[in-house]
Structure formats: C-alpha cells, structure tokens
C-alpha cells in the first residue's frame, strides 16, 4: 500500500468478501492486492487469504483475516455523508439487506459487524443550525429514526 496511514479491519476469514461488497456498494471504492499466507498461522493455513488491500470511498483499508478473537463494535464506524434520500436509501438498504442490521439515528451494521453511519448532509446541517430551536427539533426527530428520513428532518427543522 502507498498510504502512510491505513485503516486495518479484522475479519474472521471473510476480508475478501467484505472488500468486494464495499467496492460494489460505495463510490470511489476498489479491491486491490490480495496477499496469501506464506505459512500456517493460528486462524488459517498456508495459501489462505491473509490480507486484502482495498479502498472505501477513497480511504485506504487493509482487511486482515485474523480469526475469531476480535469482533467489530460501534467504537469504530464509517460515517457516509449522503446527498439525498435516494442515496441514503441505496446505501442503507445495501448494507441491511446483505445480512446487516438496522440500528438507530442513521446507524446500521454490515453482516461482518462493521458499523456504518449513513448520514444525509441535510441532517448534519440541521443539527448545526445556528437557530438552536431548529437544531433541537431536527435532533429530536433524528432520535426517533432508524434510517434517516430527509423530508422529516427538513420538516422538523422548519418547525
């Protein structure tokens, strides 16, 4: 990899599958080099996929097939700024319908347990509104949602 800083994500033998899904789902994403283990290791055998280089929306990542010792959790997530409801729906649905699960306030998990925040720009702008009452209304509306509803956020912001 050419990047000095790369996000390393731990998988239990499924790094290549995850990288292919991200590359097919998110713009500016691709699968790069696949490296196979030069010898046996605790969670795999010589020749198994050990690491996968990939990018997610331009961010360099390395998928490591390290075994079952560690699991993803909400302490790390990708936050994806979407432009409209159609993009929000497309990305949210791709993650959830591919074995993932819904959560609250625009969060969901993919089938590998990695957390994603699918966040319309409208929401970010609304909760940063200098009109604190408008920001509060938008925030309170968001707190009731799973997938973010752009029209509902806009309506709450307007009051």
Image: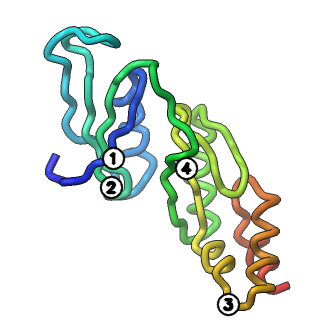
In this rendering, position of residue 77 left or right of residue 104 = left
Q: For marks 4 and 1, give the one nearer the viewer.
A: 1
* Mark 2 crowd level (few <14, some 14–19, many ≥20, 10 Å Cα): few
For the residues marked 4 and 1, what is the alpha-carbon distance in whole angstroms?
15 Å
Q: Which of labels 2 and 1 is toward the front?
A: 1
> CB of mark 2 within 8 Å of CB of mark 1?
yes
User: How far, Cα to Cα, is label 4 from label 3?
Assistant: 27 Å
**Callout 1: helix, strand or loop?**
strand
Within 10 Å of disc 3 (Cα), the crowding (few <14, some 14-19, many 20+) is few
Residue 113 x, y percent position in the rendering: 55, 34
Q: Are marks 2 and 4 in contact (CB under 8 Å)?
A: no
Residue bearing the label numbered 3? 130
Dot 4 surroundings within 10 Å: few (below 14), some, or many (20 or more)? many
**Which of the numbered marks, if any, corresponds to residue 116?**
4
Q: Which residue is mark 1?
A: 7
Mark with earlier residue (2, 1): 1
Q: Earlier in the sequence, mark 4 or mark 1?
A: 1
Q: Are marks 2 and 3 in contact (CB under 8 Å)?
A: no
First in residue order: circle 2 vs circle 3: 2
| Between 134 and 21, the one nearer to me in the picture | 134
Label 1 – label 3 distance at C-alpha: 34 Å
Instruction: Report, in whole angstroms, how far the alpha carbon at label 2 lies from the one at label 3.
Output: 31 Å
The residue that mark 2 highlights is 59
**Residue nearer the viewer, 23 or 48:** 48
């Amino acid at each position: 990899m050419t990047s000095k800083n790369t996000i390393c994500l731990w998988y239990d033998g499924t790094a290549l599958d995850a990288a292919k899904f991200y590359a097919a789902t998110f713009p500016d994403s691709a699968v790069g080099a696949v490296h196979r283990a030069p010898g046996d290791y605790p969670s795999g055998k010589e020749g198994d996929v050990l690491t996968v280089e990939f990018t997610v929306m331009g961010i360099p990542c390395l998928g490591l097939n390290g075994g079952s010792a560690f699991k993803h959790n909400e302490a790390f997530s990708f936050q994806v700024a979407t432009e409209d409801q159609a993009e929000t729906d497309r990305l949210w649905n791709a993650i959830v319908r591919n074995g993932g699960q819904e959560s609250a306030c625009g969060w969901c998990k993919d089938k590998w347990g990695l957390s994603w925040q699918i966040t319309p720009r409208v929401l970010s702008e609304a909760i940063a509104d200098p009109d604190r009452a408008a920001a509060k209304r938008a925030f309170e509306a968001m707190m009731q949602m799973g997938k973010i509803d752009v029209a509902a956020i806009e309506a709450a912001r307007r009051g």
